[in-house]
Amino acid sequence: MKSIVILFFIAITWWVRPVSAQMQVAKDGRITVTSAGLSYDFFPRFIVLFNSADPALALKPAGIAKVSYNVPTWRTGDTAHADYVQQKVSESVAGDGFDDKILRSKKENRTANIYRSGTRFLLTASSVIEGDDSTILLFPEHPLFGLTAWIKTRDNDVQIYFKLTPKKDGFFSVGYIGAPSLDKGQVTELWQPLIWTEKRAPQQPYMTPSFMATLPATLVNDGHNSIGVMADPRYLPFQPLPLLENSQFGLALLNDSGKLQPQVFAPVMGGAGSQMKAGSSFSFSLNLIVKPLTITHTYEQLAKDKMGFRDYRTNATVSMNTTLDNLIDYSKTHYAWFVDSLKGFAYSTDVPGAVKNVSSLNPLELALIRDDKDMFEKRAYPLMEFMLSREKFLFTLDSTQKIQSPSRKLKGPIAPLSELQVLYNLFGRNNSFYPLMAKKEFGSARVRNLDEKQKGRNWINAMFMFKLTSDSSYLKLSRELADQYLANRVDTRMEQFGDPMVSSNFFWPTFTNNWSALLELYELTGEQRYLNAAHDGARHYTLFTWMGPRIPDSLVTVNKGGKAPMYWYLKSKGHRQMYYPEEKVPAWRLSEMGLTPESSGTSTGHRGIFMSNYAPWLLRIGYYTRDSFLMNVAKAAVVGRSESFPGYHINTERTTAYEKVDFPLHEHKDQSVNSFHYNHILPMASMFMDYLVSDAFVKSNGNIDFPSEYIEGYAYLQNKFYGAAKGLFFSSREAQLWMPSRLLKTDDIALNYISAKKGDTLLLAFMNQSLQPVTTRVTVNPSLVTFSKQAAVKLLSPSGQVQALKDSSFQLMVPASGITAIAISGADIPKGFQDQLLADRRDDSADYAVIAEGNAKALLFTMGSYARRLYVFLQNDDSKWKSAKLIYSINGSSPKEFVKKEYPFEFTVPVDLNKPVRFHLELTGRDGKLVRSKEIELGR
């Protein structure tokens, strides 16, 4: 493995300037903030919006080109203000997270422009009174309301408070519109949650309601400072769970003059607290922001200083290893809803009757590292066949199904080129069909997921073609195309949605550069520019991670009355109530900080998803660049969230239901807390595995380092693949990752671990997730490993302590947030499935054939010394053939028959190692005619 020289990321100088600023208040109430040698004026200007009748606040599809996103709209009686255009939504846009009340509600006169949501009144302070600890702003009296405001400063922190007193019943909203405004050409970068990042500016004054704000702020950057406004965090409370109906404010970036100006409106017009009685009062406060930092570094500082973000999580109820064991146990039960006949996980939450898979590499990695033959046979191998035969990840036999654009065709491979490369290399480069398919995919384009078309010839695939072929011309091409990508995508901030590699934006990775693949290129080449670009992309990705609400230092009561929350979407599908005991738990366990919504199009319903596959990538990039914020976000995303598979997301209210080990062990219709996408189960297991190995790499300062491959999957489901090659474990080289189920019993749940083997030595590394040192007893499972009388324990890491082994147990100490690594010699570690799969066995026999009859393909898989399998599938379907028969003979034995009378027409036959197989097809057409193919021999 090529060694990687870890280069410290040298930040641009103005990122690390002192973040203090100077402030003064003029006699007219104008606030001038000076930072980085520049002055910015915040004026005492407000707008009051009024409606005598309910404006019927409702989220609607924005209709922005190349991005799916919902924005607040308001009913208006003035047709001149009815600028919202009702969107026609395709029937393929449906399923979990897509709300018909939003997407398909009736057409009416509406506006998405916050300035047109009511009758507007512009106000500027008419006089100023200097108080002892504040500056009071007075405004002209108005027949509908009275407005007062005051300015407070503390340690260069500037806050504006205001109070509205209605004189008439009605609906009110107050907007602060005094922040600096800039032309788009003056802006280096901008941010309005959720989707307006880099230089993608809103097309009109759209408002982000507080429940959709990952941080209660909006910002612009002029190349010197980030300027913005931030709602006081107290108006984004922890309880109840933030939703549209309890949002107390909104944020906007584009003003009514078409300039970029950070703004905050409270309350949300038509929302909570906006209906007011004459004589009542409404108060609110906000912070003024000027920081000599980039947008992402300002985001980080506000998250820490204002929202209290920190290294806040630890293992809550079990270790991550126990979670992983439980999750994998669950994945093999019928509750995980794997449809054997279709070789895929049921996708009935979204698309009834369909199955969907992510990658064969997820179960293959788990089978390999965990020495799990059962996982290979039940999940990995069927998915290998699926990924080489199906046209799309989403497969259904129902030709009338339109939701999410599934396919019925066997016109694969659906496996991305990177997956073909991993499979080829893993199995000793024995299967010739992998490079054949890869080269074809490199020269073509394919729609794999939803309707997103992917071009084969790009810098990412060129990198994997190099890893597949060892042809340096591919690496040269990868660098050339990647450098073009850096110039066009990384060094140039996006002004429109879409980018050089994605035609539209939906899942969050499409909103940033492809930083996981850039990290792969950096680790392959060691070239700093790729790490710099990956770091930039990772930091921008954190803009989609929740940094609020603030976590109270208190207990929260959940599952009141013994009932778990019921997700409205599943309730509408007839799912049944779930019951879990009412309990009080620390608020941090329930927090979404560090998680993301699912996507731009479903962010209104999926507050925080548990598929945090980005976390291990953030952890590694944070280590390479010494960026503790990325590392803390990574930990917040995955540590201490569940004891097994937690389902998909946080949605209606806070609960501990998804923490429980038995949470996934229910029939589909008995799941009602959140949605279950069964194809996510194994990618989540890979996520945990990646995090464990990456955490060991980081905490050991690179002294535990296992080679990896790339699991590309789709959407945000990228992770590293381990186990195919041996690695470094402190002084032990050529160590093999080996982590069978329940290998260790650790008395303290704060410790996670990884394990490896080398000869008769068991290698263990314990990573402490708590902020306190841990001393505990560990027991090695004697049914998996036994020790000789001469067995000895040796401390490998410079930190930590360990005592002698006694009856398979030992005591050790792991420093706070640290690592202790040990080696136990004299271990009897049985050889098993892992060794067979990784056996270095050369097989140059014929293994691929194309059959004209039925437009069929035949593949002979060779998998180490473990097995060979013949897989034959027809690309023609049941519109042409009534049945198909495979007649085969292994090494001249008596012929056997395999008949399929239903589509898909596919056959799997075990074939002995070193023995050829002869076969042909007999196909019966819809007209009853019989067609016989020529005879083919493979394996000789």
Image (spheres, grey):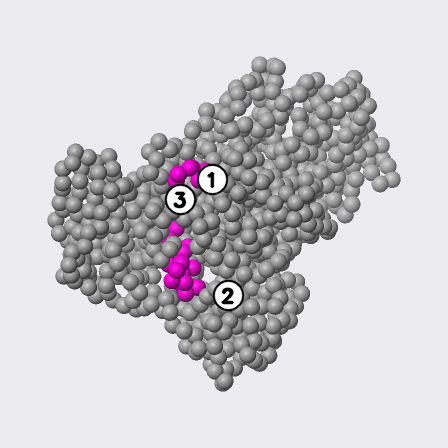
Q: Residue 219's x, y, as percent?
A: 62, 39
Q: Are marks 1 and 3 in contact (CB under 8 Å)?
A: no
Dot 1 amino acid type: Thr
| Magenta-highlighted residues | 348-376
User: Which sits earlier in the primary sequence, circle 2 or circle 3?
Assistant: 3
Residue shown at 38% from the left, 35% from the top: 405
Q: Which residue is mark 2?
A: 742
Residue shown at 66% from the left, 25% from the top: 270
**Residue occupying the far right of the picture:** 132
Q: Residues within 10 Å of mark 2 (few under 14, many from 20)?
A: some
Nearer to us: label 1 or label 3: 1
Q: Residues within 10 Å of mark 3 (few under 14, many from 20)?
A: many
* Marker count (numbered): 3
Residue 356 shows which numbered tag? 3
The secondary element bearing badge 2 is classed as loop
In the rendered image, the vertical position of residue 670 relative to residue 821, given as above or below: above
